Image (cartoon, grey):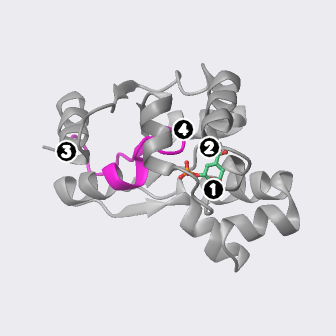
Amino acid sequence: MVKEKQDNIVLIGMMGTGKTTVGARLAEETGYPLVDLDALISEKAGCPIPQLFAERGEPYFRDLEAAVLKDVLAQEGIILATGGGAVLREENCREMAARGWVVALKATVEEIVSRVGEDPGRPLLAGGARSRVEALLDQRRQAYDFAHVIIDTSGKSPEEVSAEILTHY
Ligand code: S3P
C-alpha cells in the first residue's frame, strides 16, 4: 500500500480539520509512526502551547515551530501532523514539500467550529471561535494550496478521510 518506505506524509490544514486524528488513522494503516508537531514543540518548550503563547508570544512559538519542523523532517517514514499555522512561513512550506508528500485537509467554518469549539488548548481562538476561524481562514485562504493533494473532510469520518488519502498515495 505504501509507495516508498522513506517517504513522509505531511498533513497540513486549519485547526479542526482533523490532522492529528486522521494522522493516527494513517499511522495505523501504513505502519508509519505518527509525529505530532505541536506535541514536540510543547515537549521542547517544557510547557503547553497556550502557556507558550501567553508567556513567550506567537513569534517565539513560530521560531520554535520552524526549528522543530526542520528537525523532524530530517527523519524518513513518518506521518507528520503539523499545526495549522506551520504554513505561514515560506521556508516551512518549502521544507515540507521537499521532504514529504503533503496533504492539505480542508473543512467548512461550521465543521471547524463544531470540532474545536472554544477549545482552551487553541490560543488563537480566544475571543470567539467562529469569528476567529473566519478571520484566520480569510488570512490563510491560499496558504494550504501548495499541497500535493487537497482533501475536503467535511462530513467524513477520520477513517474515510484516511482511506481517501491513501487512494492518492
Ligand atoms: C495554530 C494551530 C495549532 C497550534 C497553535 C497555532 C494556528 O495547531 O499549532 O495553537 O496558527 O493555526 P492545530 O492546528 O493542531 O490546532
Disc nearest the viewer among 3 and 1: 1
Q: Which residues are magenta?
A: 2-22
Q: At x 65% / y 42%, what residue is drawn?
A: 85
* Helix, strand or loop under label 1: loop
Q: Residues within 10 Å of mark 4 (few under 14, many from 20)?
A: many
Q: Which residue is mark 3?
A: 2
Q: What residue did someone put label 4 on?
A: 14
What residue is pinned by disc 2?
129
In percent of width and height, residue 89 lies at 72, 36
Foreground mark, 4 or 3?
Answer: 4
User: Which secondary structure lies at badge 4?
Assistant: loop
**In-image side of 38 versus 65 (left or right):** left
Check disc 2 and give the amino acid type: Ala
Mark 3 or mark 2: which comes first in sequence? Answer: 3
Residue 96: give x, y in percent of width and height: 54, 40
Kindly identify the residue that appears in the image at 70 percent across and 31 percent down. 90
* Residue behind label 1 places its C-beta within 8 angstroms of ligand 1: yes
Residue 34, by quadrant, is: bottom left
Upstream in sequence: badge 1 or badge 2: 1
Q: Quadrant of the N terminus?
A: top left
Q: Which of the two discs, 2 and 4, labels the residue nearer the N terminus?
A: 4
SS class, disc 2: helix
Which numbered tag is attached to residue 122? 1
Is the residue at mark 4 in contact range of ligand 1, meaning its CB lies under 8 Å from it?
A: yes
Position of 48 compared to 64: left or right?
left
Please provide percent x and percent y for residue 17: 43, 40
